[in-house]
Amino acid sequence: MPSAQENLIVALDTPDLDKAVFWAKQLQNQVVAVKLGLEFFVANGPAAIKRIKEQNIDIFLDLKFHDIPNTTAAAVKQALNLGVKFLTIHISGGREMLEWAVAQKKPNSLILGVSILTSIDQLQFQELGFSNKIKDQVLKYACLAEEVGLDGLVCSPLEVKFLRRQNIKLKLVTPGVRFATDEQGDQKRVMTPKEALLNGSDYLVMGRSITRAEHNILERIEYFNNSLQD
């Protein structure tokens, strides 16, 4: 049965290390992992990853590497040496960059390819010079990700059912997940947790929908679990 413990990754979107540690303590044994992104990493550095790991919780390090192959591979190696469970790189960096990154993989780590950001809609996508539909480009990226040996794909929940119908076997990780009562914020391509899981998502990434509770995060986790049963 789907649950936060099996399917939810909570984004700790804060530059405040003490707050992130406090949240991580509450989420221990409640979720798959906590996600630490660029804001947190730039504010606190690699040493802060150890502080979060000390709360006995897996880490999704979301730095979305995208550079020349040698630089990306070196960065991936250093990031995985921090002991993170999940790590992201942009598929648009190309086959060689992806292959060099995959060569750094550790047995207990998952390297995920980022397809199209969930903040981008079709109009913005076309402004970037693409003439096809977002879902078709995501499929191209997914096929490349499988070919080079990535473990999973980060995409919006709107593409998940389409990818599963195309027999994509990658772990599908979907940000852009909101409760029906939430505001969309800066996300354009969104879906509820239950809808995303029914469509075939493996892991859901939710941030403000959970952490806005501050001192009552476990109530939000319970709300998440209940929303899957409605």
Image: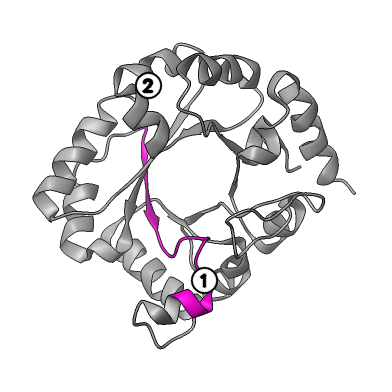
Image coords of residue 9 (percent x, y): 58, 37
- Mark 1 is surrounded, within 10 Å at the Cα level, by few (under 14), some (14 to 19) or many (20 or more) other residues, namely few
Secondary structure state at the residue bearing disc 2: helix
* Residue 80 appears in the rendering: yes
- Residue identifier under label 2: 49
* Kind of residue sitting beneath label 2: Ile
Which residue in the rendered view is the most extreme toward the left? 70
Q: Is residue 113 magenta?
A: yes
Residue underneath mark 1 = 167
From which residue to which does the magenta span run? 108-124
Residue 86 appears anywhere in the view:
no
Q: Is residue 110 magenta?
A: yes
126 to the left or right of 55: left
19 vs 35: above or below: above
Q: List x then y, in percent, for residue 182.
A: 76, 49
Residue beneath the point at 87% across and 46% down: 229
- Quadrant of the image occupied by residue 145: bottom left
Tell me the kind of residue under disc 1: Asn
Label at residue 206: none
